[in-house]
Image: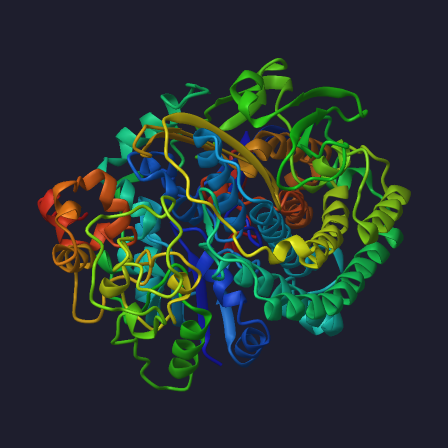
Amino acid sequence: MTETIMINPLTRVEGTGKVKIDVEDGAVKDLQFCVAVGPRFFEYLLTNKQAEDAPRISERICGICYVNHHLVSVKAVEDAWGVQVPEVATLLRRTLNASSFITSHTLHLAFLALPDLIPIENRNVIGVADAAPELASAALQLHEYGNRVVTEIGGRLVHVVTSVPGGQTKGLTGEARYKLLREGRVALTNVRKIADAIFEIYEKRINDPTEYMGLDSPYMGLINKDGGYELYDGEIRVRDGKGAQLLQFPAQEYYKQLEETTSGHSFTKIQYLRDMGPLGGTMRVGPLARLNVIDMMQWGTAADYLKAYERIFKRPTDDTAAYNLARTVELVASVDEVLDGLGNDVIMTERTREPVKARAGVGYAFVEAPRGLLFHSYEIDERGIIKSANIVAPTTFNHKSIEKNLRLYADAHAEAFSKQDTRKDAMWGIEKIVRAYDPCLSCSVHMVEVDVTVDGVKHTNRREQQ
Amino acid sequence: MVKILLLGLSGDTGCQIAIIGLHEALLGILKANELVYAPTLMDVKEIPEKIDVAIIEGGVRTEHEVETTKKIRERSSILITLGSCACFGGVPGLANLKEGQELLKKIYSEQKGTIPSELPSIDKLLPKQQAIGDYVKVDYRIPGCPPETSDIARVLTTLLSGGTPELSKTDVCELCPRERIGEYSKKLKRIYEEVADPERCLLEQGFLCMGPATMGGCGAPCPKAGMPCDGCRGPTAGNSDQGLTMLDALTSLTREANENFTLSEYVGTIYRYTYPSSQLAKILNGGGKK
């Protein structure tokens, strides 16, 4: 007899989703990870719109990754039009992109993930603030710093406005630059405080290989021309879990290397590497993948933390437990990169954009968003009107791997799911894994719930049924 | 202890991120009150029986969201719609020009690079995205995409101390520092075509700035940063249709704007956030909502 266990909605994640597990005679029969955010059809609603509006419309896909959508969108339009932007515009955009990692990674680590990593009753932001007030305060200050950099360069908080084909509509004033540099020193202190605390948790943690599970998958992320860490430009590198390079390609080769299909149980699509097919070719992106594909970390403070990371996890690693620690190294790197950008005198160049001309063409672009690679491509006509758009968000790349990862976990803990007294903890285990990926369900489309069926009876992580 | 619910429907969580932008002030509000349901921030899985203040972000796109909206309304003393998706339907409402099932098919099976398989069937999709107010009574609206953090703070603290919050009665131009001299460009320009004069009114220079048709109070951050206002705060007080208000402003600007006007290309400009709630959508849909 089959029992269905539902974890619905998944909480402490962005957007709405659920997990549905069917258990029969003590074994897992099926597991589905469903993104249930209502589809909002951004690809359709971008068509027939003026291409220069795409950065402002498409960033409404996500209230967390908005900076990344804004930037990848303007890059895709510029790719279609053959536009080169002034050096200062690239530097402003790089710094803006890095600052989005400060806000997103801080929010995730301190307020969504930390409640799973430290033993607290009240697993939420208030619980963290009560149990570790100094850490919570450092996180709030760091998040606020990220917000200030975003607002200063992007012109506005949540849904920035300054990127236009040809450059940036606004540069930095000397006053703003020095203020951000001054506050950046405090940010560096705060990020070390947070990183040290998380590294301490990981160093003491007893490694239970079935807690997050290891998943054999290809890893995909941007690298710069030296094989270093890259968030804004560069090429895609794909490596396997042993470190062997499978592919390296520019955004323009997207359709040559990747394919996608749909799933009946989720509003998100499934991406896979064409050569490997839909079964073995589903990849992982995000912090773990990025640290798995790079040859070196060029940002100084982050390089030190990467060494500490390598004492805990080998690199590359397949262990999903490494996601949060990789995210911690990246949080440090984002502060490093923002300070490097602000410290570069090029950022004070007065003319931040040039007028450009629309032309017919197809544009492709990638950037790294906090939760992984983000791809936009537009077909634009000679009047600068978008005729078709395709958007692939990080959680879309990760979707199938998350499901596979959850299945491995459910199989390893099938007995715990079958029994009433251990089920609640097993369901928490499911949510911890989903959260490790920091899924952005609005981005991927939008929703997570966890449902489990054990011997035909439905269980959910909703309160009254636990 | 006021019991607060914070939930996102068909939207992008950006309004909740704007709330998190209150930082220490938010911790203060959360400690003095009781957050009873907020899936983004805490692990409660079921909507509680009694809610004092419900804050909903996002519009309504699926049947499940309609049920959730009605359930929350029944259980709440005060319901606030946060942001332009909840207040007017928002950017996703631009997809209302095509029916839901047709779109599902288009995006999930006819998209470049997509190998068609099953169409998603996890939740029944409604034909159109709608505002919360199309389904239930709304007590307060905080428009914006997202609303300014200061607006959210003001409305919440006023409500939580028993007062009645009010929204701005001005337009965006009121606080815009750009100078108007009363002379308009003869040509409607697109923002990439030329670098705008940083001191002068963008609309006078020919860039389609939605400032005159948009509720003020934001401090005009977009025109200050060199970008036209795109109307994210919805219509000004007393005007129900933002696009018509803007067209009215444009007739005095340039003939070209009217001659070259095509709905599909400009609906994303003059109705970017408010199409589902506009008079135009009602005329095109024969007034049918649900």
Which is nearer the eye, A328 or A216?
A: A328
Residue at image coords 21%, 71%: B237
Which is nearer the eye, A424 or A18?
A: A18
Q: Horizontal and vertical percent for residue A368?
A: 61, 40
Q: Is residue A306 above or below residue A28?
A: below
Which is nearer the eye, B147 or A111?
A: B147
Q: Horizontal and vertical percent for residue B176?
A: 34, 70
Q: Is residue A156 left or right of residue A312?
A: left
Q: Is residue A25 visible?
A: no
Q: Is residue A99 visible?
A: yes
Q: Horizontal and vertical percent for residue A150?
A: 56, 59
Q: Is residue A257 above or below residue B135?
A: above
How many labels sit on residues? 0
- Quadrant (top left, top right, bottom left, bottom right) of the N terminus of chain A: top right
* Quarter of the figure with residue A137: bottom right
Q: Is residue A246 left or right of residue B80?
A: right
Q: Is residue B118 above or below residue A307?
A: above
Q: How is the image coloured?
A: rainbow
Q: Is residue A408 left or right of residue B102?
A: right
Q: Horizontal and vertical percent for residue B128?
A: 25, 43
Residue at image coords 36%, 26%: A360
